[in-house]
Amino acid sequence: MKFEKPIYVTMPSLAPLSEVDAYLEQVWKSGIMTHNGPLVRRFERDFATWSGLPHLVAVANGTLAIQLALRALGMPPGSEVITTPFTFIATLSAILYEGLKPVFVDIDPKTFNLDPAKIEAAITPKTRAILPVHVFGNPCDVDTIDAIARKHGLKVVYDAAHAVGVKVNGKSVLEYGDVSATSFHATKLLNTSEGGGIYAADERIDRTLRELRFFGYDDAKSVVRVGTNAKMTEVNAAIGLANLAHLDDVLSDRLAKYTLYADLLSRSDALAFQKRSDGCNHSYFPVVFRSESALLKADEALRRENVFARRYFWPSVNTYRTIVPDAERCAISESLAERIMCLPLYGKLSEDAIRAIAGIVLESAEGAA
Ligand code: T4K
């Protein structure tokens, strides 16, 4: 059965418009649109409270959040940053944009996260930091990574773009590492349309991040460093505040939908799934096929029914020859990237639609097996 309207990989989780309007009225009344105004400050406070963090730096998007996080650590140009090849292009471009050198270390084939057992072999005298990603909201092995970083005197910046609501050892995963950068993009569990957030426990780093996002100004409006404009606007904060009130419901709904997909699909041994750790937020539903041709066949079958899954993440970012011509090969990531696809997963997706999508994927994968 062909879906009447196209089903995309995701749709934004949106609060009722009246709830956004209530915040926007404040913006219209005050005329304060930006420059870390009252709604941005409130969004920072409320998101931090919801996450159990003491503070947060809200920024314009998740890519700038990673860039500022790297910049705030003050690494010399050309410093090596150990990172994962299995991620969205933004992780890599942020490292390159900051004039740093990415060094790719392959992933764990089960969790899809940077494999901590392979990190130490990649450390050189130029290594200054490790930048892992909590892929699809599945937390990294933070204790092992932090222990390696401490042993070698390295900084850790987590790309936590997918990790809103993720907990490890009973606390927000954003608390791990020196700095964590998250995303509030329209496609994320909590969205401000475009937006990002950075958390650093260290007060000096936190202050530096605030200066970096605001042209290098300190609180007294003296220019104390080279900064940029990475501010979140009041309108974005209004959307975020309204959506934040529904975040607990969004998270429990994702878990229910993820579980339904998993129950339906795990009966086939033509498919494999991400090994999730406790605290995962189930923000994506990735499914792994035996071969790229099996994936393409399933994708085609879905498209025929008006369903548009996404190849997150393909290709493995170490293979972007135009920007990283000499990058390390990463066999596990490159193979996974060819065989993995994320199925539609969002609040308005009905149970019937999930059953139908799973049926198409199963039929196609088993036919290809
Ligand atoms: N690090 C990681 C690991 C990331 O995954 C990302 C972003 C970042 C860093 C950087 O964060 P940001 O700078 O973006 O804050 C999307 C998102 O644009 C991107 O935020 C996300 N990761 C990435 C995984 O996915 P596309 O090009 O696949 O998205 P797009 O625009 O095709 O959207 C997917 C589907 O969502 C559409 O088919 C329809 C739906 N959609 C999308 C938008 C933008 C809507 O319904 N409404 C919308 O406004 O990159």
Image (cartoon, rainbow, N blue to C red):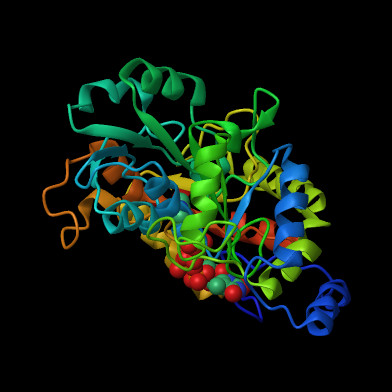
Image location of residue 207, percent across then percent down: 54, 47
Q: Is residue 283 above or below residue 21?
A: above
- Quadrant in the picture for residue 81: top left
Q: What residue appears at the point 59 percent right and 33 percent down from the top-left corner?
A: 175
Q: Which residue is at the front of the view, 275 or 150?
A: 150
In x, y percent, where is residue 115? 36, 28
The answer to which of 207 and 314 lies nearer the viewer is 207
> Residue 79's quadrant in the figure?
top left
Residue 143 in sight: yes
> Foreground: 287 or 65?
65
Relative image position of residue 112 (x, y in whole percent): 42, 37
Q: Please state if 144 lies on the left or on the right of 100 as rendered.
A: right
Q: Is residue 312 left or right of residue 176?
A: left
Q: Quadrant of the C terminus?
A: top left
Please identify the quarter of the rendering in which residue 130 is found.
top left
User: How far across and down, in percent of the image, does residue 107 sit?
Assistant: 35, 34
Q: How many marks?
A: 0
Q: Give left or right: position of 242 versus 212.
A: right
Q: Is residue 268 visible?
A: no
- Name the image quarter holding the N terminus: bottom right
Towards the viewer: 292 or 96: 96
